[in-house]
Amino acid sequence: MNIQTNIPLSTLTTMRIGGNADRVVNVTSEEELQQAYKNSKELEQPIYIIGDGSNLIVHDEGFAGVIIRIKIMGIDIIDENQETTTVNSGAGETWDVFVKQMVERNLSGIETMSGIPGTVGAAPVQNIGAYGQELADTFVSLRAYDTQSDDFVTLKKEDCGFAYRHSIFRGEQAERYIITHVTLALSKQPPQPPFYDALQQHLAQQQINIANVTVQIIRDAVIAIRSNKLPDPNQLPNAGSFFKNPIVPLQLGETLKASYPDIPIYPVDGMRVKIPAGWLIQSCALKGRILHGIKVHDGNAVVLVNHSAQGYTDLAAARKKITDSVYQKFKITLEQEPLEL
């Protein structure tokens, strides 16, 4: 167990803003996690759990408590049959490294989520997804430390309350469970068309026969697409997609379509549709703009880049400008995707 004091959280989060944490504890096992949590509780110190900090926005005042960073590693095949391979991963593994290893094994189910920043343990929290796949599609179970019972528990898919970019871990049970391992069941079958529109268009442009694609072809295509739309946070500080794609009533979607014929609309169910947040922001002439030191990314307006922001106050001002602009024009309220501390 490694303990550090007075650590700038801007160095532990990919948006690169935020004040200091009193203490940061790096844990590499379930035993260390349990001990670190209990020690902090006994000292009556606030506790917050992070992985790579890629989906977290920190306020300027920092955190007067203990940050526990999950560094539990290891990837193991735990079951296999003719159709699927079941894999267990430590929560501290980097998500894209995990995806890469599964693609190298010709396992399908998470390949379109290549390039998403963060750790495996963070993936269930917001039910990550991209290009037609989401974590819930392959999820079997997870192991977590239950802070209420001071014990380790296994939660199955039905226990997690998965929805669009949501789960109980950022909802009604936020802060109760600390994820240590995640188990997925991946398919041995090759990816099957039709694919997500942007992905299918990319394959067509590359003159790739979609009837014969492999998981590696899909991964390579996704990485190529993302390289233009989602910048590397190591080079351009950002927290990935900053806004959720809003899901709105069908009637509102139809009204907007009448006024804006080129608006992309995707059906969710008989009563709701999804509209890309990036399109809404771009349509407000904000793409490429620098607002209070925060830049609306040139390649993807749903990504906010820390260009020269001095702290959270600047980010909050930029966010308000964007959300106000979208609401005034479309009567849609954008929701932030990253968590806040």
Image (cartoon, rainbow, N blue to C red):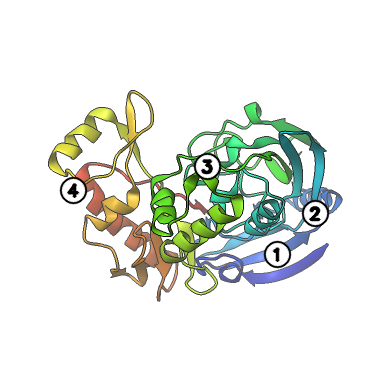
Mark 1 or mark 2, earlier in chain:
1
* Residue behind mark 1: 23
Q: Which mark is residue 329?
A: 4
Mark 4 or mark 2, earlier in chain:
2
The answer to the question of whether label 3 and label 1 lie on touching residues, with beta carbons closer than 8 A, is no
Q: Image point 84% across, 51% down: which residue?
A: 35
Q: Looking at the image, is 325 positioned above or below residue 193?
A: below
- The CA distance from mark 3 to mark 2 is 24 Å
Mark 2 residue element:
loop
* Residue behind mark 2: 74
The answer to the question of whether label 1 and label 2 lie on touching residues, with beta carbons closer than 8 A, is no
Q: Looking at the image, is 310 positioned above or below residue 60?
A: below
Q: Image point 33% across, 29% down: which residue?
A: 272
Binning the other alpha carbons within 10 Å of mark 3 as few (below 14), some (14 to 19) or many (20 upward) gives: some
As shown in the figure, which amino acid type bears the numbered disc 3? Gln
Q: Looking at the image, is 163 positioned above or below residue 46?
A: above
Mark 1 residue element:
strand
Q: Looking at the image, is 214 positioned above or below residue 162?
A: below
